[in-house]
Amino acid sequence: GCQRSGDLNCSGAVDSVVNVDEPVGRAAGALLGAARMNQAIDAIVIAVAAAGGGRVLTSDPDDLSRLASQVKGVSIHVI
């Protein structure tokens, strides 16, 4: 599990690695436009989570929460 103690330890929290293909890129671009933002990596994270109805673990929820508000099924969890 994830615990915070100086160093972030989330071993076992990641259950997959995905390719950022054209559909993911387009979804991320649409999120950026809808949210009027320019954080491409954050948008990719949310686009991937949206495709799988996932949870996003982060220590910096501000931009991710703003992007996630544009889609259903994505929850942001602060660690």
Image (cartoon, rainbow, N blue to C red):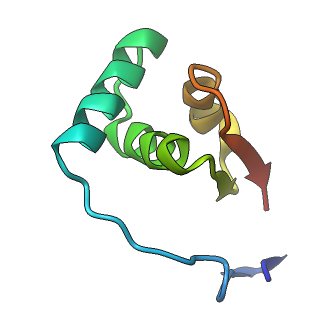
Relative side of 28 to 74, left or right: left
What residue is at 78 percent from the left and 78 percent from the top?
A: 2
Q: Quadrant of the C terminus?
A: bottom right
Relative side of 4 to 31, left or right: right
Relative side of 66 to 17, left or right: right
What residue is at 63 percent from the left and 52 percent from the top?
A: 54
Percent x, y of residue 26: 24, 30
Is 35 located above or below residue 73 in the figure? above
Is 64 located above or below residue 6 in the figure? above
Give the camera-side residue of 75 and 62. Answer: 75
Give the camera-side residue of 36 and 18. Answer: 18
Percent x, y of residue 60: 66, 48
Percent x, y of residue 21: 19, 51
Relative side of 20 to 78, left or right: left
Q: Identify the residue at the far left of this view.
A: 22
Image quadrant in which you'd find residue 74: top right
Q: How many marks?
A: 0
Q: Quadrant of the N terminus?
A: bottom right
Is 58 located above or below residue 38 in the figure? below
Give the camera-side residue of 54 and 12. Answer: 54
Q: Identify the residue at the far front of this view.
A: 52
What residue is at 48 percent from the left and 14 percent from the top?
A: 35
What residue is at 66 percent from the left and 78 percent from the top?
A: 13
Image quadrant in which you'd find residue 30: top left
